Image (cartoon, rainbow, N blue to C red):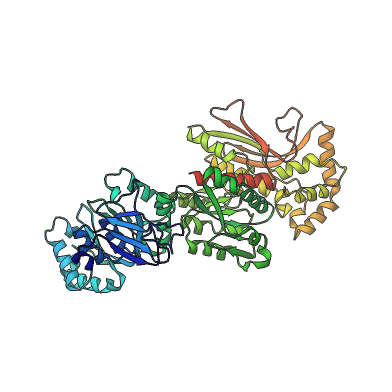
Amino acid sequence: IFAQALNASKLEIWSDVNGMLNANPRVVKEASPISSLSYQEAFELAYFGAKVLYPPTIRPVMEKNIPIYLKNTLKPEDEGTFISGKNEDDTDRITGVTSLQDISIVTISGVGLAGKKGTARRIFQVIEESDVNIILVMQGCSEQSICLGIKTEDSNKASNALSSHFDFEIDRKLINPIEIENDQSIIAVVGDKMKSQVGLGGKVFSALGENGINVTAITQGSSERNISIVVAKKDEDKAINVIHERFFQKAVKKVHLFIAGVGNVGKQFLEIVKLQHQTLLEQNQLELIIVGIANSRKALVDENGLSWDKIEQLKEIGNDSNASQFVECITALNLRNTVFIDNTASDQVSEQYAALLGNSLSIVTCNKIVGSSATENYNHLLELAKTKNCHFQYETSVGAALPIIKTIEDLRLSGDRVHRIQAVLSGSLNFIFNTYDGSSSFVDVVAEAKEQGLTEPDPKIDLSGLDVRRKILILAREAGYIKELSDVNFDSFLPDGSMETPDTESFLQFLSENEQFFLKLYSEAEKAGNSLKVIAELNEGNMKVGLEAVSADSPFANIGGKDNIVALYTDRYKDEPLIIKGAGAGAEVTASGVFSDLIYIVNR
């Protein structure tokens, strides 16, 4: 007021911040000062929560075109923010993003609103007489609903007044009962240069959608200076961050990782993240931040990212936790660009997938349990990922890093149909039967495979054939067949009584006591010039797994070490199958496959 009355050449406002920032620094750590603003932009940002400037301050100086300088008392040499009749910034992007909390959405809807003159006037009059301020107004062109954004503290007052005023229409079902949606926030995207800028709104909403943020309501004035978006209060900080990242942090994309499992695969995955961290940052402008890590008993979480020292001390300094508590912590943090990594073979972890996907959190897993669970559960998770706009990647659940699932998916998308699959799908079993020749006991070969990280933590799972049965079931489902684990025919290659052993130690002891059983299998195959392979087969929906003696001219005969091989017979590959071959087991290759799935998600 004084600046206007004195016809001042400028108005300086000094505070403890460097002018007006493009986001709330308590919400967005990367918030930065805005060098130039128009009066209108400053008013919008101040109205929607930017505390450095009081909205009524702007009008008197704007009338006389007096520029405003927002300066920092503690750093007077800093540029601060210059406010005038025009934004002097030469970039074509939004100016800032801010928010209002504790908002309720009042909805008046019903067929009786359409074409009814005076209804809007009645609504606004009732609200005015109730001494309630309207922050936001939205109406669809069908005229069947009007939504008002008001402060939550006024919601009951407004609802009661509207219900009383429209009781006649409500009784006759011309208008629906007044609806109140509490716990909402308004996100305001502000900028003069938004006007006529094609695709800007799309960038805002795609950023929100990619992070699973539901938009309750939208409004934009004809000036195109402000897009106001209503979201759930729990998503407010996340929404501000994803919009800010999309428009102001193009240099580096931050991805927040929560990792379950630090065993053989988990340790190797962490090594790859550590090794590639700087390369991804410098060459791909991608920063992987490990926010949480957990084993079956302990968890560590730090919203700002865990140091490598802390990660390595999980067992010593981690908090007591289980899979459910770990996932509850992840969903409560609600960070943008979150990916959950499952490096376990745990059903307790896989049981949490629905909660994660339901909160629009992407998953990368090498865990086979979900992919081979009941069809209903498997389809439910796929549908959740689709409807919640997130990713569910499980390539490494079959064949480690080999692109088997992706190949089948691409074949089907191109119109091909898979009729038959023949495969060696267990790198651990292939290693065991390739290595065993009677010179060392069978149980010693199994122990060697376990030591190399080729088997599951419990090798009984591998030798029971369960691991291979799960894998062929997953491939059958990817090929379009609706099947259950019980549909896989299995011929056991273990001596009777093996699976009745109570634990791993007694199981290995039982194998040792039955060495002659395995020696006989090997000797008979070797005498005939054959080699032993555990082969899984899908043939027009029929599945089987068993130990076979294959001849020297078989494509499966020369599969050495821990390799896998998959032969796909399709409409296009009828006589000569499409062959995928390579290392199919081992912590290092599995971890590399998990990492590849992660990068696939990030790049999408």
The N terminus lies in quadrant: bottom left
Q: Position of residue 275 (x, y in %)?
A: 64, 48
Q: Position of residue 263 (x, y in %)?
A: 68, 55
Residue sitting at x 14%, y 63%? 121
Q: Residue furthest left?
A: 117
Q: Residue furthest top?
A: 575
- 181 vs 457, nearest the viewer: 181
- The answer to whether one can see residue 217 in this image is no
Q: Is residue 140 left or right of residue 414?
A: left
Numbered-mark total = 0
- 302 vs 548, nearest the viewer: 302
- The answer to whether one can see residue 532 in this image is yes
Q: Position of residue 372 (x, y in %)?
A: 59, 49
Q: Is residue 314 left or right of residue 493?
A: left
Residue sitting at x 66%, y 56%? 262
Q: Is residue 11 left or right of residue 407?
A: left
Q: In which quadrant of the rendered view does residue 583 lie?
A: top right
- 243 vs 453, nearest the viewer: 243
Q: Position of residue 450 (x, y in %)?
A: 75, 50
Vertical relation: 252 (above or below) 106: above
